[in-house]
Amino acid sequence: MIRRTLLSLAMLLTLGQNHGMAQAGQAQAAVSFPHLMRSAEAGPVIPATVFFRGLAAPIQVRNSAGVEVVKGRFLLAALVDTSGYSTGVQERYQAYLITEYPLTIDGQKLAPGAYGCGFIAGDKFLVQDLGGHELFTAHTQKDPGLKRPTPLQWMAVPGKAGTYRWYAGRTAVEFTVEPDERP
């Protein structure tokens, strides 16, 4: 009797494990690309500390997001703890952007790489190289209808393939991922 019960239990555990593996496989198969990433997915991919203007600063994992454009190739952003920087730098540098693809932001081209970014006065989004040199500014838009704004999130723009909005609260800037011929 005990032997039969143990055998039955072993069979149930095996069936449960196989069912769990099948569900995990289906969940992986269900991921389509491009794939919007919330902080739980983007945080582990972004370096824990980032370099900008001579200092290494920790990222805020809870305030990270991105787009996995194709499997294993990313467009990522994270808010940064800028407490070690001067007030002037803090006003212009709030986030770190990493892109493996060329981007177009408000008509400006941005090559693959890592950048310091910030939402600044005058409804502008500032992009800087890692030395803190201004590359360009882009116009931002307010989205009063956005439900549940967060400090950082990405959303696909309906009807515009490859175009995403990076939101800081209700303020957003649009990014278009450009075609890339590299493998």
Image: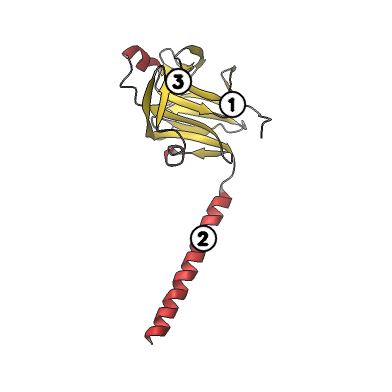
**Three-letter amino acid code at disc 1?**
Thr
| Label 3: few (<14), some (14–19) or many (≥20) C-alpha neighbours in 10 Å | many
On residue 176, the disc is 1
| Label 1: few (<14), some (14–19) or many (≥20) C-alpha neighbours in 10 Å | many
Q: Nearer the viewer, residue 46 or 15?
A: 46
Quarter placement of the C terminus: top right
From the top left corner, tell me how far across and down residue 99 is, in percent: 54, 28
Of pointers 3 and 2, the one earlier in the residue sequence:
2
- The residue lying furthest to the right in this view is 181
- Tag 1 and tag 3, C-beta contact below 8 Å: no
Of pointers 1 and 3, the one earlier in the residue sequence:
3
Measured in 3D between alpha carbons, the distance from the residue under mark 1 to the one under mark 2, in whole angstroms, is 36 Å
Determine whether the residue tagged by mark 3 lies in a helix, strand or loop: strand
Residue 167 showing in the rendered view: yes
Determine whether the residue tagged by mark 2 lies in a helix, strand or loop: helix
Q: Nearer the viewer, residue 156 or 73?
A: 73
Residue on which disc 3 sits: 117
On residue 64, the disc is none
